[in-house]
């Protein structure tokens, strides 16, 4: 692993080791992928203010997210089919996050079930909820999360229907997968991945199969999932979930000031400024460009987090400077998982922490909790002119 210096190195290794249809599922956006690219590009337009002659020896990355102590203000975002990047992927990622000291969030559409992850970890993790048409199933999921001692419920709001991702269509990604000849040949060239998948019993959606009447295998799962994402979800449904769930509630997918204010009104403990990694509405702005206005609008009413485009510790610091209390990383840790399993996720977190600490030092910052917008000197526009970070 001596040659792995950054998240991009993990991405390249994951691309070689993970079957194309599953790698593309994770590393793709909807339609033209304009928003997917903007999520990372717009971080690059933010410039740091370098400072010198400041005592930076004792830099502190530790913080809190919804009252939970964290080694740095980073959480592992919920990712559907994480367990297809690596056998037992959700368990491996959860263990790496626990060992490092950051939160892990399990997706509703995970391969490993809530109970599986709880059995293989010793600390509470978070659970992400999709609001399905089958409200009884939603209630059971919330109950199962509570019984598994999940410490937060993260409700994803920006998937009332699936955005179109061209790569998934071309690769035949469905439940069950329907790969073409090219993907079958690619699967044959990934024997280590295939052998690990053969050894595990976890190869379907563990939170669904066996928990819904009539859904007992991958074939019956396809019909169920295609009809379950609910375009009728409103704030009344979120209020209903707030009444059911007594723990911390996080609402993910906020990209508008008015929606952020509604989230406050409904009783959220935190909101996540997120465009679903550019996988839903192509043509939406990047998460980082939307963050400052939303953070100012809600003030301290709720914690504001950011998700989308974070590939380095520098990105984490820029998000904190623009008003985020913390960030969620998805593709970054998924690259580590696909490349090296649990060790790869740990390495991803170590890389981000090191980059975060070094950049804080060069900016004259010793405490992550004291970071302000003053560490950013300017934002570089597409025309080459410079303007203030507040001018978003």
Image (spheres, rainbow, N blue to C red):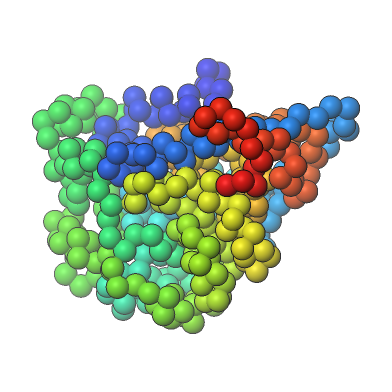
Relative to 100, 39 lies left or right? left
Residue 47 left/right relative to 106:
right
Along the line of sight, the residue nearer the viewer: 310 or 85: 310
Q: Position of residue 139 (x, y in %)?
A: 37, 77
Rendering quarter of residue 37: top left
Side of 209 where 125 appears, left or right: right
Q: Position of residue 325 (x, y in %)?
A: 65, 54
**Residue at the location (84% across, 27% down)?**
52
Count all numbered tags in the image, as a single digit. Answer: 0
Residue 173, located in which quarter of the rendered image?
top left
Residue shown at 53% from the left, 46% from the top: 289
Identified at 38% across, 60% down, the residue is 158
Q: Residue at x 19, y 52 (%)?
A: 175
Towards the viewer: 262 or 104: 262
Q: Position of residue 154 (x, y in %)?
A: 48, 63
Of 257 and 267, nearer the camera is 257
Considering every residue shown, the one lying at the far left of the view is 181
The answer to whether residue 381 shows anywhere in this view is yes
Say if residue 88 shows up in the picture.
no
**In the rendered image of this protein, does residue 378 appear above or below residue 267?**
above
Residue 384 percent coordinates (x, y): 56, 27
Quadrant housing residue 33: top left
């Amino acid at each position: 692993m001596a040659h792995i210096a950054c998240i991009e190195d993990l991405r390249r290794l994951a691309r070689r080791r993970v079957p194309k249809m599953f790698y593309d599922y994770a590393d793709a956006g909807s339609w033209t992928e304009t928003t997917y690219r903007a999520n990372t590009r717009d971080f690059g337009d933010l410039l740091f203010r370098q400072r010198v002659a400041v005592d930076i020896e004792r830099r502190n990355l530790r913080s809190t997210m919804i009252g939970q102590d964290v080694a740095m203000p980073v959480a592992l975002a919920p990712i559907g089919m994480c367990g297809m990047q690596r056998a037992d992927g959700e368990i491996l990622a959860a263990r790496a996050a626990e060992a490092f000291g950051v939160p892990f969030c399990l997706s509703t559409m995970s391969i490993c079930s809530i109970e599986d992850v709880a059995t293989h970890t010793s600390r509470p993790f978070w659970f992400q909820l999709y609001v399905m048409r089958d409200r009884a199933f939603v209630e059971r999921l919330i109950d199962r999360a509570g019984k598994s001692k999940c410490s937060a419920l993260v409700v994803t709001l920006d998937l009332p229907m699936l955005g179109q991702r061209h790569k998934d269509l071309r690769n035949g990604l469905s439940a069950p997968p329907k790969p073409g000849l090219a993907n079958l040949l690619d699967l044959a060239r990934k024997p280590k991945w295939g052998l690990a998948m053969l050894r595990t019993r976890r190869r379907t959606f563990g939170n669904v199969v066996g928990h819904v009447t009539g859904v007992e295998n991958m074939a019956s799962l396809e019909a169920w999932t295609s009809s379950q994402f609910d375009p009728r979800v409103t704030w009344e449904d979120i209020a209903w979930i707030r009444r059911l769930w007594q723990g911390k509630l996080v609402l993910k997918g906020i990209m508008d000031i008015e929606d952020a204010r509604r989230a406050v009104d409904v009783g959220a403990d935190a909101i996540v400024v997120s465009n679903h990694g550019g996988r839903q509405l192509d043509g939406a702005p990047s998460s980082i460009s939307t963050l400052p206005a939303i953070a100012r609008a809600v003030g301290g009413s709720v914690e504001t987090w950011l998700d989308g485009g974070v590939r380095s510790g520098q990105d984490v610091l820029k998000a904190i400077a623009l008003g985020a209390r913390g960030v969620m990383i998805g593709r970054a840790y998924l690259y580590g998982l696909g490349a090296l399993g649990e060790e790869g996720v740990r390495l991803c977190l170590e890389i981000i922490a090191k980059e975060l600490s070094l950049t804080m030092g060069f900016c004259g910052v010793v405490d992550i909790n004291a970071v302000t917008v003053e560490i950013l000197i300017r934002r570089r526009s597409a025309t080459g002119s410079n303007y203030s970070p507040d001018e978003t």
